Each structure stands twice: as C-alpha cells, then as structure tokens.
Image (cartoon, rainbow, N blue to C red):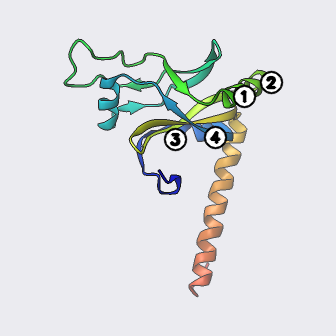
Amino acid sequence: MDRSRQERTLIASNKRARHDYTVLKTYEAGIVLAGTEVKSLREGRASLVDAFAQERDGELMLYGLHIAEYGFGSWTNHAPRRTRKLLLHRVEIERIREKVREGGLTLVPLSMYFANGWAKVELALAKGRRSYDKRQALAERDANREIARELGRHLKGRTRRG
C-alpha cells in the first residue's frame, strides 16, 4: 500500500509529554494487543497519561498505558493497565537502547492511533525539562504567537492603536 496516503485515526494523545519533556526523536511502533483491547481502542477509550516505555530482555515494553475494559467483553476481557510489547525493528531497538543507556533520556509515548487498521504508538526519545525550562518554553510560545498575530494584522493593513 502507498505510504503517502496512509490513513490515521487518532485514539489518544499525551499533551503533557510535550510540556514535561524536550522531544529529541520520534519513532512509530506497533503494539501487541488482545482482541478486546482493539475493540476498546476503536471506541477511543485509552489514556497515555502515566505511560512510559522501557527495555526488558532485549524488547521494548509499554508500561502504564490504560485501555479501559471492553463493555461487551466476557471472561476474555483484558487487564486495563497490563504491560504491552512494542514492535520495532531490531536495529531501531538497539539504537534506542544505546541512547537511553547514555543517561538522561527516556521513552515517552506521545500519541496512539490507527494507521491503515493497525494500532500504532508514536514514541519519543525525550529529555526531561526542569521547571524553569517549562516556563521559558511557555513564554517563548506566547511571544511567537503575539508576533504572528501582529504580523497578520500588519499584512491585512490593520495596525493596533495604543
């Protein structure tokens, strides 16, 4: 299938992660799921708030991802916060392991979505921000927004009086 026309349906996003971490590189990973988990995800019942990824026995595992139990599930229903295996190429896993071992970096899920019917997780190799970095990033974003607003007014021929 043509990758340029890939259909993406967002399930959940972790907005707090971009605030708390500086994203250095992102990866797209598949995720091993049970049948009831997929059905629950199709209803949009997932939360990435406390989720993180770590290497265990040469594989990447996703911890803390909450997928609500499927309403019509029977005894086959899944545990909402179970550990789930991430699917990446071996070479990518090795690169990630090396960077995380260097120290100061962590793996944080940014979003979860369906890409052509397959559940995917967007993982970020990220560095934690300190509180003053967060304030600086917010001030920078507000300044850029104000600059864009003024530029838009100027281009439209309206200038602000005051």
- Distance, label 2 to label 3, CA atoms, is 26 Å
* Sequence-earlier tag: 1 or 4: 4
Q: Looking at numbered disc 2 in the image, what kind of residue is underneath it?
A: Glu
User: How dense is the environment of label 3, judged by Cα within 10 Å: few (below 14), some, or many (20 and up)?
Assistant: few
Q: Nearer the viewer, mark 3 or mark 1?
A: 1
Q: Position of residue 5 (x, y in %)?
A: 47, 57
User: How dense is the environment of label 2, judged by Cα within 10 Å: few (below 14), some, or many (20 and up)?
Assistant: few
Q: Position of residue 53 (x, y in %)?
A: 58, 24
Whether residue 161 is visible to the viewer of this picture, yes or no, is: no
Whether residue 106 is visible to the viewer of this picture, yes or no, is: yes
Q: Where is mark 3, residue-wise?
A: 15
Quick one: 28 or 125, which is closer to the camera? 28
- Contact (CB < 8 A) between labels 2 and 3? no
Q: Nearer the viewer, mark 2 or mark 3?
A: 2
- In the rendered image of this protein, does residue 30 appear above or below residue 59? below
Q: Looking at numbered disc 3 in the image, what kind of residue is underneath it?
A: Lys
- Contact (CB < 8 A) between labels 2 and 1? yes
Q: Looking at numbered disc 4 in the image, what kind of residue is underneath it?
A: Thr
- Contact (CB < 8 A) between labels 2 and 4? no
Q: Where is mark 1, residue-wise?
A: 105
